[in-house]
Image (cartoon, rainbow, N blue to C red):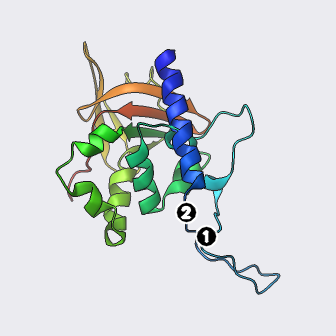
Amino acid sequence: MKQTLTIITVIGMIVFAMGCGNQEAPQEVNSNTTEETTSSDPAGQAFVEPAEGETPNILQIAAGSPDHKMLVAAVQAAQIENVLANNGPLTVFAPVDAAFEALPEGTVETLLKPENKKTLANILTFHAAPGKYGPNNIKGVMGIGQATGDKVVVEVTEEGTFVNGAKVLGSVEASNGYVHVIDKVLLPPEK
């Protein structure tokens, strides 16, 4: 219970930090006027604040987590915040910062560059599955179809639950699905 509360607190902090960050949104033209919104105006579901006592969505959980700063930065760089805040249901495997730090030197910095946005979005999308797979029903499946069209393999051993070799460290239910905290970054198969 304590671990779950810590994960929720951490994810909530990440979400808050994302909401406070400089977000760019596409410019929109209101059909009733000729005014355009500025690119610094946040737009979309990702920037809707939860009501007090409301269960946070996946994005808000990640943003509130002190262990998911790199994941949140990557989501922002790929500009997929609204995907993680939409109604879902969605299951996200969220690598901790140490998982990103374990990648070869320079990998994260390279992926965060604007010219690599598409590659980064593909990697992040491989961490998400349509549907709601909680800690109990994730153990009963051999593979989960990810949003990229690929599958991840779920294995349950004496050491715990693993998704493509990444250990599930904890799970948090969100208003739009589940977040499973993992200890490695999942890389989609090369096509």
Residue at 51% from the left image edge and 37% from the top image edge: 11
> Which label belongs to residue 180?
none
Residue at 21% from the left image edge and 47% from the top image edge: 103
As drawn, is 69 to the left or to the right of 33?
Answer: left
Q: Where is residue 79 in the image (x, y as percent from the top left)?
A: 48, 62
Q: Position of residue 146 (x, y in %)?
A: 38, 45
> Which label belongs to residue 22?
2
Query: Quadrant of the rendered structure where residue 180 is?
Result: top left
Badge 1 vs badge 2, beta-carbon distance below 8 Å: yes
SS class, disc 1: loop
Residue at 62% from the left image edge and 36% from the top image edge: 175
Q: Say if residue 59 shows up in the picture.
A: no
Q: Say if residue 128 shows up in the picture.
A: yes
* Camera-side residue of 171 and 191: 171
Identify whether 4 is placed above or below 12: above
Identify whether 44 is placed above or below 178: below
Q: Position of residue 127 (x, y in %)?
A: 37, 45
Q: How crowded is mark 1: few (under 14 residues within 10 Å), some or many (20 or more)?
A: few
As drawn, is 35 to the left or to the right of 44?
Answer: right
Q: What residue type is labelled 1?
A: Ser
Q: What residue type is labelled 2?
A: Asn
SS class, disc 2: loop
Q: Position of residue 61 (x, y in %)?
A: 54, 38
Identify whether 145 is placed above or below 160: below
Identify whether 176 is placed above or below 31: above
Residue extending farthest to the top is 158
As measured in the structure, the alpha-carbon distance from the residue carrying label 1 to the one carrying label 2 is: 7 Å
Residue extending farthest to the left is 104
Q: Residues within 10 Å of mark 2 (few under 14, many from 20)?
A: few
> Which label belongs to residue 40?
1
| Label 1 vs 2, first from the N-terminus | 2
As drawn, is 142 to the left or to the right of 51?
Answer: left
